[in-house]
Image (cartoon, helix red, strand yellow):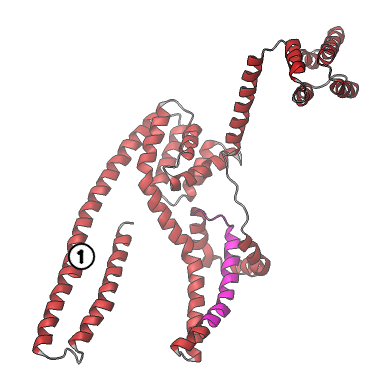
Amino acid sequence: MLNAVKRLKKTRNPEEKEQLKQHIEDKNREIFNNAGIKELKKEAEQEVKKISIPSPKRIQQLEQETFKNLTKEEKKEYLKVLGLKPRELKKLLKEEEKKKESKKLKEEDYSIYEPSKYGKIANKYAKNHADELVKKYPELFESLFNAFEQVDISILSRTYISMMIFYSILSLPTFLVVFFILNFAFKLGFFTVILISIAATIATVLGFYFYPASLKGQKNKKIKQDLPFAIVHMSAVAGSGAHPLSIFELIAQTEEYPELKKEIKKILNQVNLFGYNLTTALKNVARTTPSPEFKELLNGMISTIETGGDLKAYLKEKAEESLDTFKLDMKKRTEAIATYSEIYTAVLIASPLLLIITLAIINSIGGRIAGLSVTTIAWIGIGGIMPLLNIAFMGFLTLSEK
């Protein structure tokens, strides 16, 4: 019946048109009479009056809606008229479910950020001041905007400036109240409390300002760790003859590369949501990614695609190169850690032991060092100097890994 409707829409021959109309009406009448569905018949007749003949989509919709309300015997009769078996109907239903699932997957090919409620409050009171500040001192916020573009903060950059101004202003009275309460215990002076509160407010502003840059460094480090294995994965997918976009879709579906997945999601967003072609999306993401290695990979893929080169061969070569580089980096890192462990053993284990032995000897002889007793020096070393040296060493290790 659907084929007849499609032919009716396409044909221009009046005689054939009349024959098709008659055939469809007869078929509808046969279905309705055999199934005993009066309401469906009435609704279909109204459709016929409006557009001469129900559209294929409308007929399908009417049949689906009404079929659910039929009794078991009516369903059997209905399937008999349509020439379908229950097994064939189940097969069709499974195919429909698969289509729905594929549609859901397609809808998830892009992500949309939701507005921040804290950003809304800040924009309400500080947006005008933020816009004026950015307009008046654009060079002051240039580095902030560059870092902001390269990290995954689901807030607009101007909204972030509004939040920085609004919550920094709120922090001043908050710190004043907190430090005045603490003043009962520490007995600080009035002006000292004010100075500490102002210093804490300035620290809040600086924290907002440098936060995106700190995220940029962390993200670059994580992408660098995951990239060699991701390239091997991409090379394997490309070797199967998959479309270049499918390579990124498969990588985005895995949870093995969390930070890299965010960058790949940007590529999929620009293709599936904004309608850019793949090479344009790759160029845009290569421009904003904080990882030089990932930027190099994307630029190489752009050149390969635009020149009609062999993407499979390029990714295979890049995978081998990245794995070799990763092995060399790990070797250097292992050697560096061995050196650092020797330094730590000498400075923070052996030296304190020698110092304690020396202090014990001096204490047995009797005497003072720089006017301080041996006990005082020992407590300063154990409770102050040693923890600070350990913290400094941990900070040095963290910085050396970047």
Q: Which residue is drawn at 61% across and 41% down?
A: 273
Magenta region, residue range: 151-178
Instruction: Give amino acid for label 1.
Output: Tyr
Q: Which residue is drawn at 24% across and 81% down?
A: 379
User: Badge 1, how many Cα within 10 Å: few under 14, some, many 20+?
Assistant: some
Percent across and percent down for residue 44 are 85, 22
> Along the horizontal axis of the image, is 273 left or right of 228?
right
Q: What element does badge 1 sit on?
A: helix
Q: Is residue 216 placed above or below 174 in the rendered structure? A: above
Taking the spot 38% from the left edge, 53% from the top edge, the residue there is 221
Q: Is residue 4 something one can see in this rendering?
A: yes
Left or right: 30, with 192 as reference point: right
| Magenta span main SS | helix
> Which residue is the site of mark 1?
344
Residue 222 percent location from the top left of the image = 39, 51
Question: Does 176 lie within the magenta span?
Answer: yes
Where in the figure is residue 363, as x and y percent of width and height?
Answer: 13, 86
Residue 289 or residue 255, whichever sits in front: 255
Seen in the picture, residue 345 relative to 231 is either above or below; the reply is below
Residue depicted at x 59% and y 27%: 98
